[in-house]
Amino acid sequence: MSVSLEVSKRAVRPRSLRNKLRHEGKIPAIVYGYQIESTPISVDAKTLTKALRDHGVNAVISLDVEGKKVNTLLVKTQVDTFTKEFTHLEFLSVDMEEVTELDAEIVLIGEAAGVKVGGVLNQNLYSVLVSATPDNIPERVEVDITKLEIGDAVTIADLPKNDKFTIVTDPEEQILAITEPKAASDIEDETVAAGEPEVIGEKEAK
C-alpha cells in the first residue's frame, strides 16, 4: 500500500524556523537515500497523520518534492513528550525493487487458554525486524495465542513463514510465555528474602 504526499523544501537556519513551521501545522523533516541528496523538507501534520492512520506506519510514501516523485519509508520519528505530536521526521528514499529492513509491530490475537485458567501472559518482544521490498513490508506481525496453555512459550522460530517478507530477528528470541500465577506464599517468601528495612539505632541482640 502506498500514499502520495506533497512536501515543501525548507531552510534549516535559523533553528527558530522549526517552531514557526510547527505553529503553521507543519512538521520539519528530512529525506535522503536512493537517488536523492539529503533534503530538508516540511510535511503537513494533518495530512501525514491521516495517511499513517489509513495506510499504516510502514506504507510506502511517495513524496512530491518540487515535482520530483520520491518513494520513501518513514524510518524515524521524534515525538513531543507532552503533546505526543511529531516534532521531526526522517524519510528514507528507496528502490522499490531492492530489499530493505524495517521494524513491524507484534500484535497478539485472542486470549490464551492458559490465561483463562489463571496463568500469566509475559510478553518480552513487541516488534520484529523484517526484510522485504518496500511495498511488502508489513505494518504488523500477528501471533495467535488462543491455544497456548500454562508453560507454553512462543519464539521467533514459531512464527509462520510468509512468502512476501522474512523475519530477520534472531529465531531464538522469545516473544512471550504463559506462566503459573504466583501463589500468595511465594510473594510472602520474596518479601522476607528482601529483608525488612533496618531501624536506625537498633542492634541485633548478642
Image (cartoon, rainbow, N blue to C red):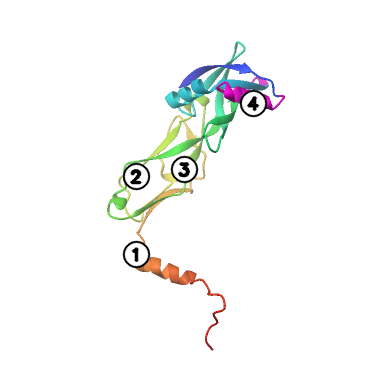
**Separation (CA) of disc 4 from disc 2:** 45 Å
Of tags 2 and 1, the one toward the viewer is 1
Residue carrying label 4: 18
Q: Where is residue 193 drawn, in percent x and y?
A: 47, 71
Q: Where is residue 21 drawn, in percent x and y?
A: 61, 22
**Separation (CA) of disc 3 from disc 4:** 32 Å
4 or 2: tag closer to the N-terminus? 4
**Separation (CA) of disc 1 from disc 3:** 28 Å
Q: Taking 11 as reference, is 203 above or below it?
A: below
Of tags 1 and 3, the one toward the viewer is 1
1 or 3: tag closer to the N-terminus? 3
Residue carrying label 2: 145
Residue carrying label 1: 183
Q: Nearer the viewer, residue 158 or 111?
A: 111
Task: Name the amino acid, label 3.
Answer: Tyr
2 or 3: tag closer to the N-terminus? 3
Q: Evaluate whether residue 95 shows in this view.
A: no
Q: Residue at x 47, y 46 (%)?
A: 125
